[in-house]
Image: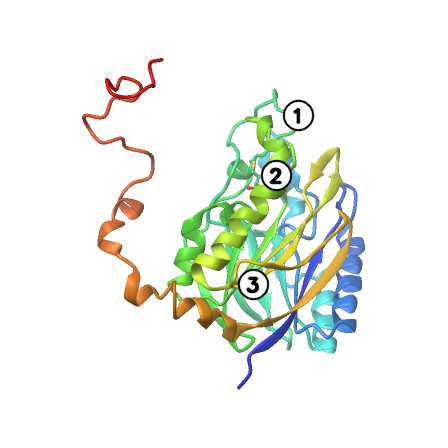
Amino acid sequence: MTRVLKIGAAQLGPIQRDHNRKEVVERLIALLNKGAVESCDLVVFPELALTTFFPRWWSENIAEFDHFFETEMPSREVQPLFDEAKKLRIGFHLGYAEMTPDGHRYNTSILVSKNGEVLGKYRKVHLPGHEEHEPWRTFQHLERYYFEPGNEFKVFGAFDGVVGMAICNDRRWSETYRVLGLQGCELALIGYNTPVHYPPDPSQDALAGFHNHLVMQSGAYQNGMWVVGVAKAGNEEGCDLLGESSIIAPSGEIVAQCSTVEDELVSAVADLDMCANYKDTLFDFDRYRRPEVYKAITSQVGIEIPEGIEVGNQEDGHLED
Ligand code: CDT
């Protein structure tokens, strides 16, 4: 059996605050059709792909932003996307803001089969930014106010392989890929909304693209998996969002990359059997991993410098000079 998939990374340009779901779903359908022209089996849309990135604004009344959330999936407005994908026999990945019937809010993504069936749901584990109003910022990043965190990285049997999902900031954490990798993940789907400007440390702005690829390429390589990272890009409500959506092979190499900050689809053939080249050799977990040495990774959250180490006070070092 060959396990070769054609994957489309469907980058979105900006979605402004007054754009409605109908307009956005039409754009998603247009990208899906581009995917059909390229014979894609799976099209990957970004994080919060139905709305503007609303956590950039503070509201004293959290419910004021509830209209950015989906209370069901597919909703009436999103149903045409499911219908078109089923008609074209293309699976897809979609990020959106989820409101549960009992009022919990999550930053969520779903994986949908070629038959239009929801195969899996993931709720973002690493919520970046801040909880409180911080008016000094050029724009806010209030994911920790608007969302509750998800609590697991899961994989799903889909597209003849083992597929996992992560969302945006998750991609910066090596634990994300390793926990997926330990479940045999062969394809990780990651949507993102990444402002190029990082208010707490603007010296990182020039490195936004470098860091984006650095983390996803190393995650792919160190776990022998394909990684598809897809942006919502461009100038959204005055905030520049990074593009550079890419499809990354288990070798860590980028095999396709978007060149604009607009709606754009790039595609690549992904051979899932290529994962074994890495999973069975250099990164043969069974043979080489040493979990008994890694205990701090699950027992500890922050940095704990061992007792007896006084930073900046070593007699034999040069730190005092
Ligand atoms: N959406 C998202 O997770 N964005 C973050 C921005 C980090 S700055 C608060 C990211 O890691 O790209």
Q: Which residue is mark 3?
A: 249
Distance of label 2 from label 1 (alpha carbons): 17 Å
Q: Which kind of residue does numbered mark 2 sit on?
A: Ala
Tell me the residue at 58%/36% (across/down).
62
Q: Which residue is mark 1?
A: 138
Q: Secondary structure at mark 1?
A: loop
Which mark is on residue 52?
A: none
Q: Residues within 10 Å of mark 1 (few under 14, many from 20)?
A: few
Q: Please provide percent x and percent y for residue 229.
A: 60, 55
C-beta proximity under 8 Å, tags 3 and 2: no
- Pick the front one: 110 or 269: 269
List the single residue furthest toward the bottom: 1
Distance of label 3 from label 1 (alpha carbons): 36 Å
Tell me the residue at 18%/25% (across/down).
308
Q: Please provide percent x and percent y for residue 56.
A: 64, 34
Would residue 36 be found to the left or right of residue 185 on screen? Answer: right
Q: How many marks?
A: 3
- Does label 3 or label 2 sit earlier along the sequence? 2
Which mark is on residue 208?
A: 2
C-beta proximity under 8 Å, tags 3 and 1: no
- Does label 2 or label 1 sit earlier along the sequence? 1
- Looking at the rendering, the quadrant in which ligand 1 lies is top right
Would residue 281 be found to the left or right of residue 217 on screen? Answer: left
Q: Secondary structure at mark 3?
A: loop
Q: Please provide percent x and percent y for residue 166.
A: 51, 55
- Does label 3 or label 1 sit earlier along the sequence? 1
Q: Which kind of residue does numbered mark 1 sit on?
A: Thr
Distance of label 3 from label 2 (alpha carbons): 21 Å
Quadrant including the C terminus:
top left
Tell me the residue at 74%/66% (across/down).
32
